[in-house]
Amino acid sequence: MERISKFRATIVLLLFVAILGFFAFKLYDLQIIETGGSTNNQATFTTLTRVKASRGHILDINGNPLVSNRASYDLIINHYVLLTANGTNDNLLRLVKRCEEAGIEYTEHFPISQERPFTYTLDQQNAIWQDRFQVYLEWMEGLDSDITAPLLVEKLRERYKIPAEWTDDEARKVIGLLYEMSLRKCIGSLPTYVFISDASDEELSAIVELNIPGMKVEASTVREYSTKYASHILGYVGAMSAEQWEYYKNIEGYDMDAQVGQDGLEAAYEEFLHGVDGWREDTVTTDGTLVSSKYLQEPKAGSNVEVSIDLGIQSAAEDTMAQVIADLQKPDEKGNLKDGHDVEGGAFVAMDVRTGQLLACGSYPTYDLTTFFDNYEELAKNELKPLYNRALLATYPPGSTYKMCTLIAAMDAKIIDSKTEIRDLGVFRKIPGWEVSCLQWTNYGGTHQMVAAPKSLQVSCNYYYYELGYQLYKYETDYMDITAKSLGLGERTGVELPEYIGQRANAQTKAETHVGDDRVWYQGDAVLAAIGQSENRFTPIQLCSYVATLANRGNRYKATFMNRVVSSDYRELLAENKPELLSHMEISEEAYEAYSEGMYLVTQDNGDWGTAAGTFGDYPIKIAAKTGTAETGIDGTSANGAFVCYAPLEDPQIAIAIYVEKGGHGSSLATIARSMLDVYFDVDEVGEVNSFENQIS
């Protein structure tokens, strides 16, 4: 009996020890492990920190980086820690004063002006932040949505217990930061307050030494431009607008304050480039000690987009165009102004004729994306409009570069064949009471004598095409307009960036763009349209697509900047360009041979001097080209200059279009095309073709 009692006592004692051990372990777990070793049993707070995903890189077709990322640091504020610390208002005042002293800009969205008289600035914010302000007013209680700005500041001075001796300006600045932190309390889904984005080393040193409770440095990345070229097509990123949010809110990885592509390729390929931000849950004590940290969602970097742009061709074109324009502006050796001395802007486009991929695309004057935001106001006020993408948005009369279109139309209408000769009389007088002269007559008092199709392009004989336009007008079918449309003129190219359509010269266009009796389409209009004047207005990218279609004997491909998209680690191919045929036009063998031979002769001197022979006469690769000069319609100014080409003649691979406002004769622009072809074909200075990827087979 005594033995049983001892056994029971032992069991009870062991059970008691086990219970004590269990509670001791739980106490240790709660006080030591879950509080990161703190035995002070401090209260803890859990905050959500957004971990930015790296945006995908933009690379050229050869893998050269165009836009990438660089490591940066953000200064963030844990509102729980700062709002529960002693002297919150004093700490915030020290913070804003240090920023003012050091010239540091910080993020703050309180919609009231910084200085008296206080006024609302809601109209300067997007709808997202306007809505957040309304949520804040409701959460604060007793603050009506129609409260005046001065009264709101006064009420918030009381709520936040701002010292009476502080100036209104000091109070307003501190209230702005308190507003940001209060928003995180009333809208729990908002991430931690990023006080300064992309802080420099100097800014970090100046702020961190203040020892503000809750202030923390967070690693991040920012966009970095790896080239000074292609600014008009690369674009930039920025905070999304309310309209953009309506689109992106249903797409994974987008929050209301996400940065998105706002222009150019950054916008066109946004959904490839944009990664998915991660979310980290941090638990900290009231003094800011990190207790635990875990990812609720790992960040996923954006995909890398390899575009079709060849940086070598792009840089050669931009540099040479700038030099050509600078040379045009200089007087000649005798001090006389050159034709083109009043040159303004220009553009160039190069396309792979086999795929529609754009190898180069630029506009002049240009700008530097690395200083875009700093210099925006100056750029916006510049009379030459450096922000304007002339390659895709500017429409111009094509001048003589249009003549291949007229030639094909006339041959389709059976007006001529490739051997038909027309006598150049210098002045075209077949329309009673109206006449127009050929440039050869105007400039030199001579004519081109008897002219057939190939020679008409070589010497760019206007009289020949006046006659074709005159004859084409007699047909009920508008062969010229049908041909122009089929070749892509006045049509969308399909490029991913915004583009203007322009217009073709025809009866409908004139009726829509003129008034009164001037709305009628006369025979003289057709005569002028035949040399690329009248109502013809096309973009440089359309001219390039048109020339590529000529090279392809009627196959017109969709223009695109896409080459391929790969995963962030370059291991997986996610998308790649597949040539898309937009239209096909049947071009007869005779017409093809006629314009091909004529465009080749433009670069040759065979007794008749081709208008681009001075630039390409000794070139080791056969080039098919056409120069153009188009009137501006403004008295006393130089004409616009145009130049188009494709190469090689027998096996076309690349098409180029160049246009310069008030650039004079298009032959002066051939140098720009040559610099681009030199890079594409790897031609050295003495004119030899080296071994390269695009070598003619």
Image: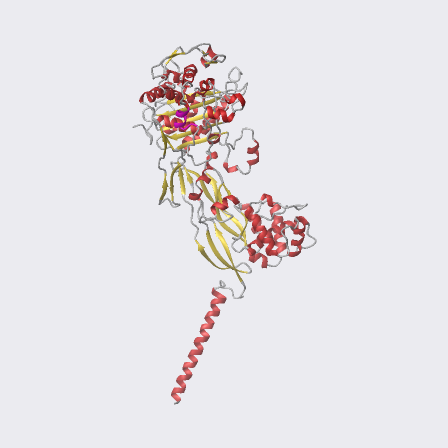
**Residue 647's spot in the image, x, y percent?**
36, 25
**Residue 180's spot in the image, x, y percent?**
58, 52
Q: What residue span does the magenta drawing correspond to?
A: 481-489
**Residue 689's spot in the image, x, y percent?**
34, 26
Image position of 310 (left or right of 158): left
Judging depth in this view, the residue of 321 and 478 nearest the camera is: 478
Determine the residue positioned at 45% across, 70% down. 25
Residue furthest out toward the left: 697
Judging depth in this view, the residue of 242 and 690 nearest the camera is: 242
Coloring applied to the structure: secondary structure
Quarter of the image for the N terminus: give it.
Answer: bottom left
**Residue 347's spot in the image, x, y percent?**
46, 28
Can residue 3 be seen here? The reply is: yes
Can residue 674 be seen here? The reply is: no
Asked which quadrant contains residue 212, the reply is: bottom right
Quarter of the image for the C terminus: give it.
Answer: top left
Q: In this view, does 322 lie above or below 372?
A: above
Residue furthest out toward the front: 476
Image position of 453 (left or right of 329): left
Q: Is residue 357 above or below residue 587?
A: below
Residue furthest out toward the right: 165
Q: Is residue 417 above or below residue 243?
A: above
